[in-house]
Amino acid sequence: MKRDWIAVDWGTTNFRAFLMNENRVIARISAPCGLLTIENGAFADTLHQQLRPWIVEAGPVPVLMAGMVGSQQGWQNVPYVTLPAAAKDVLAGVQPVETPWGSLAWITPGLCGQSAWDQPDVMRGEEIQLLGLNALHPAQEHYALLPGTHSKHAWMKNGCITAFSTLMTGELFSVLSEHSLLGRALPPQQEDNRSFLAGVSAAQRSVPFSHLIFSARTRRLSGEIAAEHIHSFLSGLLIGDELSTLPSGQRAWIVGSTSLTARYQLAATVTGASLTTVDGDDCFLQGLALLRSHLQELTP
Amino acid sequence: MKRDWIAVDWGTTNFRAFLMNENRVIARISAPCGLLTIENGAFADTLHQQLRPWIVEAGPVPVLMAGMVGSQQGWQNVPYVTLPAAAKDVLAGVQPVETPWGSLAWITPGLCGQSAWDQPDVMRGEEIQLLGLNALHPAQEHYALLPGTHSKHAWMKNGCITAFSTLMTGELFSVLSEHSLLGRALPPQQEDNRSFLAGVSAAQRSVPFSHLIFSARTRRLSGEIAAEHIHSFLSGLLIGDELSTLPSGQRAWIVGSTSLTARYQLAATVTGASLTTVDGDDCFLQGLALLRSHLQELTP
C-alpha cells in the first residue's frame, strides 16, 4: 500500500486523476471541473470530492499535481522554473499544498524561457510529458511536438529541456471556426481527409497566415471545398502551418492523444515531416512518477 | 438637377450613402443597416427608407451601389469580374436593379483572381477605391494598401488592377481580443503607442504567426506589457505582421479613414515602409463617379 499515490492533471477546462501503484495505473477519473469552474478558491474541497473513493480505500496517499493548478489563477502560484531545466530543476520548484484530509500533496512548477524565435514563452504541464518522454525513450537529443490548444515544440538535450515554442494552433481553430467569417453560416460539418490534406498543402508555401486562412472563404465561394468540409480544410491549413515551422528533414516525437496525433501523422504525409507517436498520458504519468520517486526520498 | 446622383456603399455591417452633384458631395448619411440586418430580402424598402428625403427633394436620381450588396447574401448576386480588371471591365459587369420609386439603379461587381501568394482571392467594394485612386493620382503603377476587417493589398498597372491579396488583420484582432485567451480577464483598455510599437517591432522577425501572438500572453505575464495596453500591443503585432509582407523598400498608398491610416503610418516608422495616405471616401466616390459617367452615356 505504501507505494500507492495519485497523479493529477488539472487544467483550465478539465480535471483528470490517476490512482497509481508505482508506475502502474490502477484507476482513472476525469471531470469537467477545470480552473474556470472553481469558485472562491475551493480547490482543496474539489480535489477531496474527486478523490474521496480512492482515499477511503487506499488511505491518505500522496498526491502530485501538474498543470494550470499551479498558475496565478490556480490553487497556489508556483513560480516558473527558468530554462534550461532538467528533472532536478523542476523538482526544486515543486511546492507543497495542504489537504484537509492529511495527504501529502504537491504542485509542480511550469517553465519559462526564450523560444526558438526569441519570444518569451511559458508552459505548465507539458514539461512533465517531456521528462516522461525522455524516461521512456532515453536519448541524447529529443525534438518533440505536443499538439493542442496551445501546441508546444520542445528541444531536449541529455534529459534537459533547453528551448520550446508555443503555437496557438488549437485555439486559432476554435476562434476562427466559431467566431470569424470563415465559420459563418456553415452546414453541419463532416470530417473529410481530402479537404484536410488540401489545407495542409496550401499551408506549405510561405503564405502569410492572415492571408492563408482567407482561402477557407474563397475556396468555399469557388466550390473547390464543399461547405460541409470547411472545418477539415481549416484544420489542415492550421496544422500544415504548424508543421511548416519544422526544420527541414527534422525527426520529431509527437506526444498526445491518439485522435490528435493521427491528424498530425496524416498531415506529415504531405509535409514530409518524420513523426513518431508517443501516448501523451504515458509520458505524463512517467514524468510525474519520476518526480514522485524523488519527492518520496525527501519526505518521511 | 440632371447631374445629381447617389453613391451607396452597402456592406455587411453598415450602409452609407452620398448625394452627389457630379463629383461633389452634397450630403451624406450612414446607418447600421448592413446586410446582416436585412430581413426577407427587403433591400429595396431599406434603400427607399434611407434615401427618401433626398428623392423627395432631388427627384428619382440614379443610384450606383457597391459592396457586399452585390454578393450572394446581398440584394442581387452580381458575379465577380476576373483579373486583370480596368474600369471598362468593372463597368461591363455592372447590373441594374429595379427600384419601386423609378430611380435607375445599379450594383457594381466585385473582383476575383489569384493573389500574390497564388491563393484564390476576392474583393467587393475596394476595387471602386482603387479605380478612384488611379483617377485622383494617375500613374503607370500603383501599389495600394486598403486596411480594414479584411485588408487588401493591390497592384495596378496603367489603370488596370492586376493582382490583390486579402489579409484578415482586422478580423483577427477582433476574434483574438474578444474570444481567445489573449483577451481574457483584461482591465479596461487604454491606447498606448509604446506598446503598439513594441508589437510592430516584435512582428518584424519572421516569427510564425501562431507563435507571435502568444507573446501578447507571455509579455503580460512578465509585466513587460501592462494589462491595460494588451489591445495596443496585439494591434501592433497584427499591423506589424501585415506590413512585414511588403516587398522591401516598397512605396505604397494607404487608403482608408484618418484613424486607421494613422495607425499604419505610425507602424511604418518602425518597419521602414514608405506609405502615402489617401482618404478612402475620396477614392470610393471618385471611383463610382468614374463608372457613373460611363453608365450615363449608356442610358437615356
Image (tube, coloured by chain):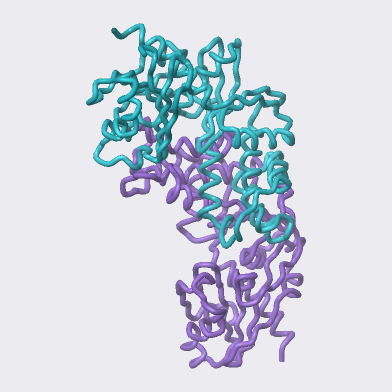
Chain colours: A purple, B cyan
Left or right, residue B249 beside residue B70: right
Q: Is residue A4 above or below residue B219?
A: below
Q: Position of residue A73 (x, y in %)?
A: 60, 70
In this view, the residue in front, B190 or B143, is: B190
Q: Residue at x 24, y 21 (%)?
A: B102
Q: Is residue A121 visible?
A: no
Q: How many marks?
A: 0
Q: Is residue A260 above or below residue B6?
A: below
In this view, the residue in front, A34 or B184, is: B184
Give the position of the N terminus of chain B as an image quadrant.
top left
Q: Position of residue A156 (x, y in %)?
A: 71, 58
Left or right, residue B112 beside residue B168: left
Q: Residue A43 is drawn in which quadrant?
A: bottom right
Q: Residue furthest left?
A: B100
Q: Residue at x 31, y 49 (%)?
A: A188
Q: Residue B38 is drawn in which quadrant?
A: top left
Left or right, residue B4 beside residue A13: left
Q: Is residue A9 above or below residue B205?
A: below
Q: Residue B18 is drawn in which quadrant?
A: top left
Give the position of the C terminus of chain B as an image quadrant.
top left
Q: Residue at x 63, y 32 (%)?
A: B245
Q: Is residue A228 visible?
A: yes
Q: Position of residue B98 (x, y in %)?
A: 25, 23
Q: Position of residue A298 (x, y in %)?
A: 74, 85
